[in-house]
Amino acid sequence: MKEYGVKRVLMGRLKTGDDLLLSLETVLNEARITMGSLTLVGALRSATVGYYDQNKRQYQEIKYSKHLEILSGVGNISRKDGKLMVHCHVTLGDSEGRAFGGHLMPGTEVFACEYTVFEFDGPVLERRFDHETGLALWQLS
Ligand code: ZN
């Protein structure tokens, strides 16, 4: 575990038609954020999320070609291969009030999205390949 202080809190919104994950990365890169966390609420025109198959050790892609609510989006911001990486999970809702979601992937089109970003002060966490899980995880030691 590492300890952090909150340096800044940024609030904003993405544009209609933006790719949710890619536009978040652009906003965070422009704000020069290297460590932090974020929350999202809003609505989508379509979504692409991942489900990590622990046996196959790969993401299974799930596409939704319909309008959805972002009931909740939570994520963290750190580094992978020296670059910013946003790891975000979303809970989505449909017109029947059903909820589902997954690991946010490119291919998710924003209808409206408000974000709150908490920038942290402290050691930068770098992701590296973890042999036990097959995932790029934080190196804490
Ligand atoms: Zn994930």
Image: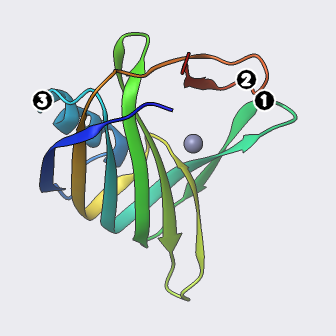
Label pair 2/3, CB-CB below 8 angstroms: no
- Residue 105 vs residue 63: left or right? left
Residue lying at 35% horizontally and 54% vertically, measured from the top left? 109
- The residue that mark 1 highlights is 57
Residue lying at 28% horizontally and 27% vertically, measured from the top left? 122
Amino acid type, residue under disc 3 in the picture: Glu
Label pair 2/1, CB-CB below 8 angstroms: yes
Q: Sequence order check: which comes first, mark 2 or mark 3?
A: 3
Residue 30: give its label: 3
- Residue 59 vs residue 126: left or right? right
Amino acid type, residue under disc 2 in the picture: Gly
Residue 69 visible somewhere in the drawing: yes
Q: Secondary structure at mark 2?
A: loop
* CA–CA distance in space, label 2 to label 1: 6 Å
Q: Secondary structure at mark 3?
A: helix
Ligand 1 sits in quadrant: top right
- The residue that mark 2 highlights is 134
Amino acid type, residue under disc 1 in the picture: Arg
Residue lying at 58% horizontally and 76% vertically, measured from the top left? 99
Residue 44 screen position, x and y as percent: 36, 64
Residue 81 sits in which quadrant? top left
